[in-house]
Image (cartoon, rainbow, N blue to C red):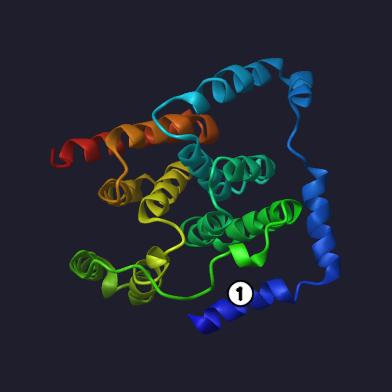
């Protein structure tokens, strides 16, 4: 893991000044459109954004603003939608999401939505952190003490996955155990409930319905309530589209019905 982290760090450290300028120019060339910009092309879209999304959805009581920011950031990162990221990164910080938690959200989603998407989000977040004078002392260390592991639950998960796929796909099965569930999920700077919230949001955002039952159950074991889970899907409909939200509905409904009451 140390060699792995060092290799990733080298990709960032040894980027040339020209590459850094190119990256910054890319972000500056595509700012989030203002309300006036949107009205000039799609006045109805601006009205929906102001009246329904910002004026209604974000004020619904089912999720607090901090949770809504986490859900939205997870969706934007998972779909590599960088235009709205600066706005929502700033909103997340204003809503109480810590810089260390944003750092962990990006790191976590490297594994659940791909390295390239995480790197794109990292570049956008870096500029926001510089603007807000957020220093390296507010970010979690690359390695350190981990949260306690539920050995019995992890043993059951590892045995089940091993029996299904271990013989045919030993590499990914081993990485899943060693890197994801015995390392990433135990990093302490993002609470287990928030880590689950990020994962479920990313899965819905990318239409990965087959993975939703395990991770939604895990989220609810980690403290997400049924009503909050339903509100996550409602919120995401506006950010990832109705088809992705509706694809998640029967899967989530099945999870709700099968959980002990």
Extreme residue toward the bottom, this view: 3
**Corner quadrant of residue 36:** top right
Q: Residue at x 60, y 79 (%)?
A: 7
Q: Residue at x 71, y 19 (%)?
A: 42
The percent position of residue 236, horizontal first and vertical second, equals 47, 34
Q: Nearer the viewer, residue 144 or 208?
A: 144
Q: Residue at x 46, y 57 (%)?
A: 112
Using the image, determine if residue 23 lies above or below residue 61. below
Using the image, determine if residue 61 lies above or below residue 27. above
In this rendering, position of residue 246 left or right of residue 85: left
Q: Which residue is mark 1?
A: 8
**Corner quadrant of residue 11:** bottom right
In this rendering, position of residue 167 left or right of residue 123: left
In this rendering, position of residue 96 left or right of residue 193: right
| Number of residue marks | 1
Q: Nearer the viewer, residue 170 or 140?
A: 140
Q: Residue at x 18, y 35 (%)?
A: 257
The percent position of residue 247, horizontal first and vertical second, equals 38, 35
In this rendering, position of residue 59 left or right of residue 39: left
């Amino acid at each position: 893991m140390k060699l792995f982290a060092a290799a990733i760090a080298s990709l960032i450290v040894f980027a040339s000044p020209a590459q850094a300028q190119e990256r910054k120019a890319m972000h500056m060339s595509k700012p989030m459109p203002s309300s006036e910009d949107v009205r000039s092309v799609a006045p109805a879209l601006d009205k929906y954004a102001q009246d329904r999304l910002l004026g209604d959805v974000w004020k619904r009581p089912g999720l607090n603003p901090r949770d809504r920011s986490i859900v939205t950031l997870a969706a934007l990162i998972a779909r590599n939608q960088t235009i709205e990221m600066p706005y929502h990164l700033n909103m997340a910080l204003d809503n109480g999401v810590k810089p260390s938690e944003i750092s962990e959200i990006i790191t976590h989603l490297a594994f659940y939505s791909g390295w390239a998407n995480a790197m794109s989000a990292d570049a956008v977040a870096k500029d926001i952190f510089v603007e807000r004078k957020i220093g390296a002392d507010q970010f979690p260390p690359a390695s350190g003490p981990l949260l306690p592991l539920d050995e019995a639950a992890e043993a059951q998960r590892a045995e089940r996955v091993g029996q299904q796929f271990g013989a045919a796909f030993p590499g990914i099965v081993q990485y899943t155990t060693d890197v994801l569930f015995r390392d990433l999920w135990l990093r302490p700077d993002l609470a287990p409930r928030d880590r689950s919230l990020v994962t479920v949001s990313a899965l819905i955002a990318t239409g990965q319905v087959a993975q939703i039952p395990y991770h939604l159950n895990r989220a609810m074991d980690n403290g997400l309530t049924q009503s909050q889970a339903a509100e996550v899907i409602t919120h995401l409909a506006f950010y990832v589209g109705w088809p992705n939200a509706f694809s998640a509905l029967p899967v989530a409904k099945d999870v709700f019905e099968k959980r002990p009451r």
